[in-house]
Amino acid sequence: MRPTLHSCKLLVAVLAVALGGCAVGPAYQRPATPDISSFKEAAGWVHAAPADALERGPWWSLFGDPVLDQLAARVDVSNQNVAAAVAAYAQARAVVREQRASLFPVVSLNGGANRSHSSSSSSASGSGGRTGNSYDVSIGGSWEPDVWGRLGRVVDSASASAQASEADLASARLSAQGELAVNYLTLRQVDAQKTLLEGTLAGFQRSLEITQNRYTAGIAARTDVLQAQTQLANAQADDVGLLRQRAQLEHALAVLVGEAPADFSVAPKAWKPSVPEIPVGIPSTLLQRRPDIASAERAVAVANEQIGIARSAYYPSVSLGASYGLGASRVADLFSASSSVWSLGLSAAQALFNAGATTARVQGSEAAHAQAVARYRQTVLTAFQGVEDQLSATRVLLTQQDLRRQASEAADQVEQQVLNRYRSGQVSYTEVITAQATALSARRALVQALADRQTTAVALIQSLGGGWQAGR
């Protein structure tokens, strides 16, 4: 008995379902990472598994600067590196949708019209030949059932790539925000250095006037005047150099917020350094929020799926096809024709010999997976190192700041005492120059120590993946 169309479809469906459970390739397992129960530089830390699903907050608000808040908020909107990462993520999501579509049948509609003419052997008499028209319309479908799980793994690979792209977007955003914060805080440090130098310049100017008066009165030597002039000119040169440094930082901020440097400026203001205190018992989940770790882990998942895709080449590819059509010699008869044509087919193809190319591709994908695992573990180790470095720097810089403040206060007292002794003729002007230079260096070192604590706080927040806020 001839099989009917319904029975053939049923047979194909049963075959596809039966073969659907034959997926090949390794199941994904997240690679093991070093079992770190605590950090050397801070107690209370426990092992953290990489992830990137937690929401980030405006961490820059911890510094209590409204201008920084306003600039950081513009990074998401206007920074071109972030915009490129957003587009890359959108592209990765589109690839996922494209690959997912391959799991479904493709249906097509075809139609055609032909006019043909044939000549007979009697055409020499002028009456031979035959002209005719033909019209046809058909609908057809094709489907490649995911017998060995290859298509599913392609979709999973694309999904993992999209997740890695999402983590890369978070990395780009965090990097831009961190760079902006560091540049802005450095700019404010330069403003503070400039304010400090302006006060020092006023003192150097008074010293020059005193020395000039003493020289005019015949009390001091000409060399004292020259030394005072040299010191004042050098300090003025340093002050001008700060203008150049500030301009470069302002230009960098403009680019980070997506503006041309010519259209952007940050007004000087008094520096009030605020350094957020990071508690010792930071939750271990913060380390899970590093986007570079999430991206590296997703790269391992992509490599794992590629192994299954490569192994599927050992098995035959199966495809199903079906079509139904009508034909007629006149358009009016096309849909009323008594004859129709339909087809239903199942095909399979398998490479019998390719000189080991399939094995080589499998081995190559396995090696790529091993490489991705190594990169992931290295990323985790680097993350641990970054946190350790910044925790250590945070502790050391706090101690250093206290020492710098003591040194600056002592140097200020020495400067005043030496200047008083010079006025009374007890010491040479060389000692005044030395004391003033030492005091200025100590003041500038104190400002630098405060700024280093701020930028280290930014680096620590970045090492923790961003988004940490007190009280969370």
Image (spheres, helix red, strand yellow):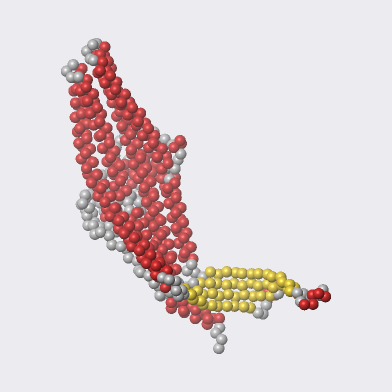
The answer, for residue 388, to whether it is visible in the render is yes
Asked which quadrant contains residue 322, the reply is bottom right
Q: Is residue 272 above or below residue 467?
A: above
Of 418 and 173, nearer the camera is 418
Q: Position of residue 275 (x, y in %)?
A: 28, 41
Q: Residue at x 43, y 51 (%)?
A: 85
Determine the residue located farthest toward the top in the rendered image. Answer: 217
The answer, for residue 54, to whether it is visible in the render is no
Q: Residue at x 35, y 57 (%)?
A: 296
Q: Position of residue 298 (x, y in %)?
A: 36, 60
Determine the residue located farthest toward the left in the rendered image. Answer: 426
Q: Position of residue 448 (x, y in %)?
A: 27, 36
Q: Position of residue 328 (x, y in %)?
A: 68, 75
Q: Quadrant of the N terminus?
A: bottom right
Of 340 and 335, nearer the camera is 340
Q: Residue at x 55, y 78 (%)?
A: 344
Left of 183 or right of it: where is 212?
left
Q: Residue at x 46, y 55 (%)?
A: 90
Left of 244 or right of it: where is 8?
right
